[in-house]
Amino acid sequence: MSILRSTSVIGAFTVASRILGFAREIIIVAAIGAGPLADAYYTAQIFPNLFRRVFAEGAFSQAFVPVFSRTREREGEAAAEQSASEALSALLAVTGALTIAAQILMPVIMLLMQLGYVRRGDWDTFWLSVFLTQITMPYLTAMSLAALFQGVLNTHSRFALAAAAPTILNAFLIIPALIFQDMPRAAVYALATGIMLAGLVQAGMLYWGCKRLGVRLRLMRPRITPAVRRIVAISVPGAVAASAVQINITISQVLASMEEGAKSWLNAADRLYQLPLGLVGVALGVAILPSLSRAVEADDRDASRGTLDLALSIAMALSLPAAAALMTVPALLVDGLFARGEFTTADAGMTSRALFHFAWGVPAFVLIKVLAPAFYARHDTIRPMRFAMISVAVNVVIGAGLFFVLRAQGLPGFPGLAVGTSAAAWLNVALLAGTLWKEGLYRPGGLALRRIAGALAASALMAAALLFAVAQYDALADAAFGAKEGALVLVVAAGGLVYAVAALVFGALRVSDLRIMLRKRGRRGAAAAAGQGVDPAAGASQD
């Protein structure tokens, strides 16, 4: 499967998931608003997501895929299955124990991590946050196992099932939000339960996918085997880096808890800027890691550079216009998507303040997902860890500093947290790219640079078109029968059309790219694609 096709498969399912995710968030914010109940609900997602990203999806998956791939290539399927089973047993034991311990100690943890509730004397929100987090914590264990199953499937170039799995979470949250839309307190209990159940179903679904593929995974007594040691050795630096990132997120949440509603505003902004990250960055990161691992094992520098060139071109062609749109019309987007029910126009205005500053970091968030696999494929997780920790330190200094400076001036402090996040992301990109360039591991080719320049020009033209469309907002609203949602669709469609045409004209995208995304390639097609940076060794997918 080519990098383009792999990305398109993952991206297509991610698009469906993100569309459902938007529907989910629209329904949820309308049901619970941006007050104390919403703050407790979003707090309940912090801890399982924190540990999940540290121990499962982030560090673990980046370590597991290269080790599993190498074992499979050198020792065969049986040895790979044994190593995966050993990792599965160890992962279940560690995350299961961590989940139980966190549930027992959650009141103490919440006292330490959510000082804003204590300072405000908001004990109702505090205890509600404790109980909801205890409900959601098993999501950690379930998603840890899901990450391992996903790594097995991705190594076999089966991307579709893992990419489709997140839609389950959306379904498990949309349904209770609709059922309890007039009962906010009941809704948050149902939503927390939905998160836990969705994790269990996702893990079961991906296990079924591995079994259907013929990969035999089994539980055994947890032991520190050579395979587990290799995964731990590789994943520890990544876990430290992920921990640093999550500590920063936690600090941001602690500060946000000092301003009622800030967590909800940041969450709504997060949903919008995470869309291009999920559609482009995560999809590319997942798609290129197996290909890069194979190229590194074969010492094929041309294939490695071609893979990164193509990934970089796609990343910028899709993330730059997203950033331009989010920066140009943030208020229009937030108001059209979220302002209804308990989520007021004033809430939308506050959310747009954070969204603007998250927006200029979008290309950096995506680039990190593209550049970091160049290190992971070489089993180098030390330097990405160092770079992440440096960027986190900068994030804390800038974010916390601006938060208190703005509050001292009588202004909301939460937009400063978004500024710190974006600034730190660009620093991380500079460190990753600078190291790859300095050591000769990767330098973008001329074609990739020309395509990035084309994406910049097309994005600028699109931003101008969006500003013109917003100036005609009243006429667009009339054309949409007075519905702000209809006017938003017309504005976005106009901007998207302008960018699509400009991107083809300026060379940011090519018609051949679209053809590769839409059809599988045979041996001759794959050989031809190799010259464009497509990985022919990945073969065809049955997904």
Image (spheres, grey):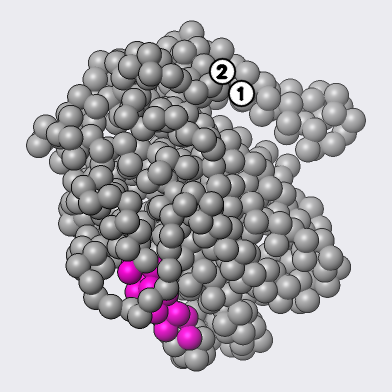
Q: Which mark is residue 496?
A: 1
Q: Is residue 510 above or below residue 250?
A: above
Image quadrant of residue 396? bottom left
Dot 2 falls on a residue whose secondary structure is helix
Q: Quadrant of the C terminus?
A: top right
Which residue lies at the image location 58% right of the left edge and 36% below the top edge? 12
22 or 58: nearer the viewer: 58
Residue 185 in the figure: left or right of residue 435: right
Which residue lies at the image location 30% right of the left edge and 62% below the top edge? 83
Badge 2 local density, few (<14 within 10 Å), some, or many (20+)? some
Q: Amino acid at mark 1?
A: Gly
Q: Quadrant of the N terminus?
A: top left
Q: Residue furthest left?
A: 439
Q: Is residue 525 above or below residue 300?
A: above
Q: Which mark is residue 375?
A: none
Q: Are marks 2 and 1 in contact (CB under 8 Å)?
A: yes
Q: Residue furthest top?
A: 505
| Residue 61 can be seen, yes or no | yes
Q: Amino acid at mark 2?
A: Ala
Which residue lies at the image location 24% right of the left edge and 64% below the top edge? 227
Residue pointed to by mark 2: 500
Residue 106 in the figure: left or right of residue 225: right
Q: Is residue 365 above or below residue 382?
A: above
Badge 1 local density, few (<14 within 10 Å), some, or many (20+)? some
Residue 151 in the figure: left or right of residue 260: left
Residue 33 in the figure: left or right of residue 257: right
Q: Position of residue 508 (x, y in %)?
A: 43, 17
**What kind of secondary structure does the magenta stretch mostly adopt?**
helix
Range of residues picked out in magenta: 86-100
196 or 504: nearer the viewer: 196
Residue 26 part of the magenta-drawn span? no
271 or 442: nearer the viewer: 442
